[in-house]
Image (tube, rainbow, N blue to C red):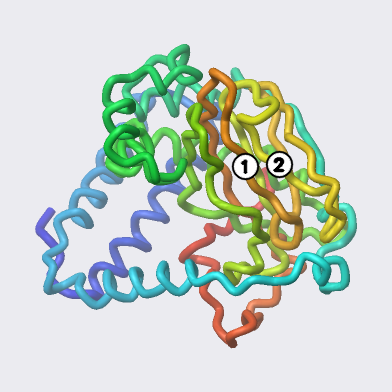
Amino acid sequence: MEAVEDVEQVVSLQAHLEALRGSYSAALASMGIAFTSSAPQELEPLRQEIQKVKEALRGVRPSAAGSSTSAAREAREARARRMPIDHSALASMPSPLPSELREQCTFGFDTARYPFREVVAEVLGVSPEALPSLQQDSEYRRGEELHPERTATRGTFVRRWKAARGSPAELRFQELLRTFVSEFVAPHMACDDFSGVAYQREVTFRVHGPSSQPVGEAHVDAEYHHPPAEVNWWLPLMNTFGSNTLHVESAPGKGDFAPVELEYGQVLRFYGNLCHHYTVANTTDVCRVSFDFRVLSMAHHDPLWTDRRGNSLFAVGAYYEPVLERS
């Protein structure tokens, strides 16, 4: 497939890629397969076409993609400009979500049907058993020595995760994530007026090794201009406890922060849009590997919503991928 030469073709290829991904997931579902580490023989041509489109997008000439790349960079920078909200004001801030979706909940899932640990390890090029001790990896240690200020979203293995985008292993992760959202997350977002969800296309991947410094600072996602109909899903790939985990308050402004103690096979749903959350210095000997993603309740999301600056930086079809609950 030839390299793309204009922005219109870039947009067209991106749309074609999403359609192919949807067709692939739907085909797996029709075959009764939630996830497979390799394409069934009859789906191999479709998988190869997905790879061709990805290669074409990676081969975009700078002159062709310049405007779209610049726009994407500007959008990322705009999202990163935090506008603090006083903690005491959070309890009185309105939300379009019903109380059951703002409630903090933990759900268990079938790790055989949704083998996230194995797939993530494959993307990183390590064994699943190595994940809790990634800090012992020589490349990780060198990175920490050279750049101790790097956060859990910028370190050695996070860079490896990002570099793997478009690889067969990363494609398997995306297929598995979409299946998980469709089959598991969407039903746990359903209310009387359920009309589907839209999930964060690129998960936030984190590696929080033992350290003397916390990662990030206490915040709510509304400070980073996220829409209020959004709910956070946080999935660790090992047991979390004490200082190696996330700390969250149970309701906006309540201040009753507690560590999130989960076992692998559990996922946390919480209202991170208005509930403060943060991490502390990881003084355990367990490296916490996790990923999280945000999910919009489409029944409660106003497509014309704008943030406090009058912008709307998180669009369905761009930042979010729409999906309906699978029957």
Residue 197 screen position, x and y as percent: 66, 57
Identify the residue shown where x is 41% and y is 55%: 18
Q: Position of residue 275 (x, y in %)?
A: 76, 56
Asked whether the viewer can see residue 145, the reply is yes
Whether residues under marks 1 and 2 lie with C-beta atoms below 8 angstroms apart, the answer is: yes
Q: Nearer the viewer, residue 51 or 243?
A: 243
For the question of whether residue 46 can be seen, the reply is: no
Write down the residue under mark 1: 279
Q: Quadrant of residue 141?
A: top left
**What residue is disc 2 on?**
247
Q: Amino acid at mark 2?
A: His
Closer-to-camera residue (24/237): 237
**Residue furthest front as drawn:** 212
CA neighbours of label 2 inside 10 A, class few (<14), some (14 to 19), many (20+)? many
Left or right of 315, for residue 184: right
Image side of residue 164 versus residue 83, left or right? left
Please state if 296 lies on the left or on the right of 25 as rendered. right
Secondary-structure class at tag 2: strand
Q: Secondary structure at mark 1?
A: strand
Given residues 205 and 258, the one toward you in this image is 258
Residue at point 57%, 44% (across, down): 292
Mark 1 is surrounded, within 10 Å at the Cα level, by few (under 14), some (14 to 19) or many (20 or more) other residues, namely some
Q: Which mark is residue 137?
A: none
Q: Residue at x 73, y 34 (%)?
A: 260
- Report the Cα–Cα distance between label 1 and label 2: 6 Å
Give the total of numbered labels.
Answer: 2
Vertical order, 192 against 33 (above or below)? below
Amino acid identity at mark 1:
Thr
